[in-house]
């Protein structure tokens, strides 16, 4: 009886996870951020809490850049299938590379920078504002 209950609890947990992943894939709104030498475009992202997004970071710069937003990524619900794209609070991109991350953001104001040497000083800074859902 106890084992059956445990199996049931585990199964329902799996279903809930699968549902969240499926929802974020089907209803996710695409958002593109272009990284260049030395800017984020758009510089200010405006998102809504609870909405699923497909955040695509595209590096059109000549060299490597990153999309570093540790607080934003820590607070967001990231699709487990994409979690490997974020390391140390940032998405690292070589020249002409892009990564897509499915996530549901949490309300707040977050800073975005490129942590490569001197890039923030050259202008690679931005922000993400996530409004509370209705
Ligand atoms: Cu950079």
Image (tube, grey):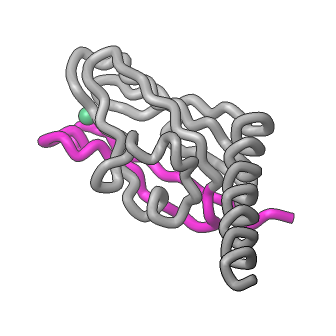
41, above or below 73, in the image? above
109, above or below 57, in the image? below
Q: Which residue corresponds to the image point at 72% horizontal and 52% vertical from the top-left?
A: 20
Task: Name the side, left or right, on which 20 lies relative to 100.
Answer: right
Residue 124: where, in percent of width, then height?
Answer: 32, 39
Q: Residue furthest bottom?
A: 2
- Image quadrant assignment for residue 12: bottom right
Q: Which residue corresponds to the image point at 79% horizontal and 38% vertical from the top-left?
A: 27
Q: Which residue corresponds to the image point at 44% horizontal and 29% vertical from the top-left?
A: 99
Residue 112 highlighted magenta (yes or no)? yes
Q: Which residue corresponds to the image point at 51% horizontal and 31% vertical from the top-left?
A: 100
Residue 19: where, in percent of width, then height?
Answer: 76, 50
- Image quadrant assignment for residue 25: top right
Residue 103 highlighted magenta (yes or no)? no
Task: Name the side, left or right, on which 28 lies relative to 77.
Answer: right
Image label count: 0
Task: Name the side, left or right, on which 84 lies relative to 44.
Answer: left
- Image quadrant assignment for residue 69: bottom left
For ligand 1, give the image quadrant: top left
Residue 79: where, in percent of width, then height?
Answer: 57, 48
Q: Residue furthest left?
A: 117
Viewer-side residue, 107 vs 82: 82
Residue 1: where, in percent of width, then height?
Answer: 75, 83
- Find the magenta span and give its range: 105-134
- Which quadrant is home to the C terminus? bottom right
């Amino acid at each position: 009886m106890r084992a059956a209950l445990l199996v049931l609890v585990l199964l329902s947990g799996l279903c809930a996870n699968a549902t969240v992943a499926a929802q974020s894939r089907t209803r996710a709104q695409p958002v593109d951020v272009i990284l260049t030498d030395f800017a984020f475009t758009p510089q200010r992202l405006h998102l809504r809490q609870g909405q699923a997004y497909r955040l695509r970071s595209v590096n059109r710069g000549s060299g490597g850049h990153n999309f570093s937003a540790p607080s934003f990524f820590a607070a967001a619900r990231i699709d487990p299938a994409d979690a490997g794209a974020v390391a140390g609070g940032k998405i690292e991109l070589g020249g002409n590379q892009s990564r897509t991350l499915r996530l549901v953001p949490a309300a707040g104001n977050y800073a975005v920078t490129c942590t490569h040497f001197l890039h923030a000083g050259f202008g690679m800074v931005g922000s993400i504002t996530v409004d509370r859902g209705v």
